[in-house]
Image (tube, rainbow, N blue to C red):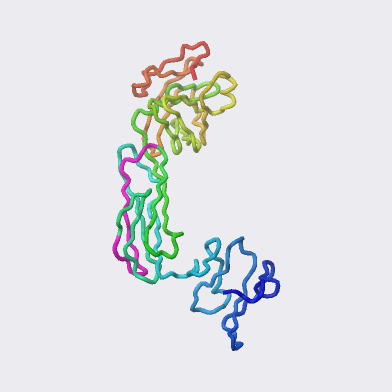
Amino acid sequence: MTVDSATLGHSGLSKVHPERILLIAAAGDTVGAATYQPGNALGVSEEKIDATKGDAPDNWTDAKWIGGTPGAVNSISVKDRDLTLTRNTQSPVRVPWGESAEVILTVTNIGRETAAPFEIAVDGAEALVGNMLPAGDSTRVTIPISKPPAGENIVHAELLFSGDQDTTNNVATWTVMGGMAPGQAVIGEVMAQGAEWVELYNRSPDAVHLSGWTLSDVRTTGQFEAGATIEGLGHVLVAEDAGRVALQYPDLDVPILSLTRWPRLNDGGDGLILRDATATLVDSVFYSAQETEASMERIDLAIAGDRDNYLASQAPLGATP
């Protein structure tokens, strides 16, 4: 419908001052009256919460959706058909290499009508969940996680329900931290004196994502920065002071990573423990007192990181980062 002038009211609806809106029948009776408050974000309308409960200020609020809901049930109102999807399992879900886990979701019918049928699609794969869910009822759904890829994996689940009048509450997201295959990443070299650093080597052709990984000594645990990666068959250095290391080795052409806390390496003997995002041991080395200023170099990358697999560097610079 349209009005018989170019604007609603005198000079249109104010964006600065509250205004009272009146709906008057042809006989002159006031059918409805409501005062809106200005200050809404651009494109956000004022909506009546319950159409059966009059025009009092507490029965109005801002719309949940940009653009409002012209010609449809208000975004903040109870719908006839409305299912919600929520996640019960804490995220991230940490799954060691080769193991499985599960995520628990809940489907709740917050609409007025019985809902049937509905499905949940996990990253696009659809699975029938239920044929009938009465109003106010809920059901739990188990999503299996079977041997996820190593590293950080973002998973999306979407509830599919024909005629759902609010699809903004139909999505659940979580992160799966998959464990690393044994022996894929190893500690290749350790510099425990001066500008301390640790060299890591990726033995596989696939990149290793270090988000959630930790490097520890016997006292301190440091976590890798978000986005840290070792390229396939590549090296990285993990350093206490990246700038100092870069000055010491000006020809260095590998990434230098940092930790949230540096596990200060003890010249008198210490240990290094590398764990993936699932807290599973990836590699470790324990060493005794350092008698020289050279680094400890791993002899054979295919052998477990025991102390007998390391010797002092013979390189002219005392290390080969």
Count up the numbered dots. 0
| Highlighted range, magenta | 130-150
Q: Percent position (x, y) of residue 202?
A: 41, 26
Is residue 148 magenta-colored? yes
Q: Is residue 54 left or right of residue 165?
A: right
Is residue 208 magenta-colored? no
Residue farthest to the bottom, as pictured:
27
Q: Examine the image and state in which quarter residue 167 appears.
A: bottom left
Q: Percent position (x, y) of residue 46?
A: 57, 69
Q: Is residue 14 left or right of residue 45?
A: right
- What's the residue at 42%, 21% (across, down)? 288
Q: Percent position (x, y) of residue 190?
A: 46, 22
Q: Is residue 81 left or right of residue 13?
A: left
Front residue (pair 72, 17): 72
Q: Examine the image and state in which quarter residue 138 appears.
A: bottom left
- What's the residue at 55%, 72% (across, down)? 60
Q: Is residue 84 left or right of residue 7?
A: left
Examine the rendered structure and indicate whether residue 249 appears above or below residue 39.
Answer: above
Q: Percent position (x, y) of residue 123?
A: 38, 48
| Quadrant in which the N terminus appears | bottom right
Front residue (pair 170, 284): 170
- What's the residue at 36%, 71% (across, down)? 113
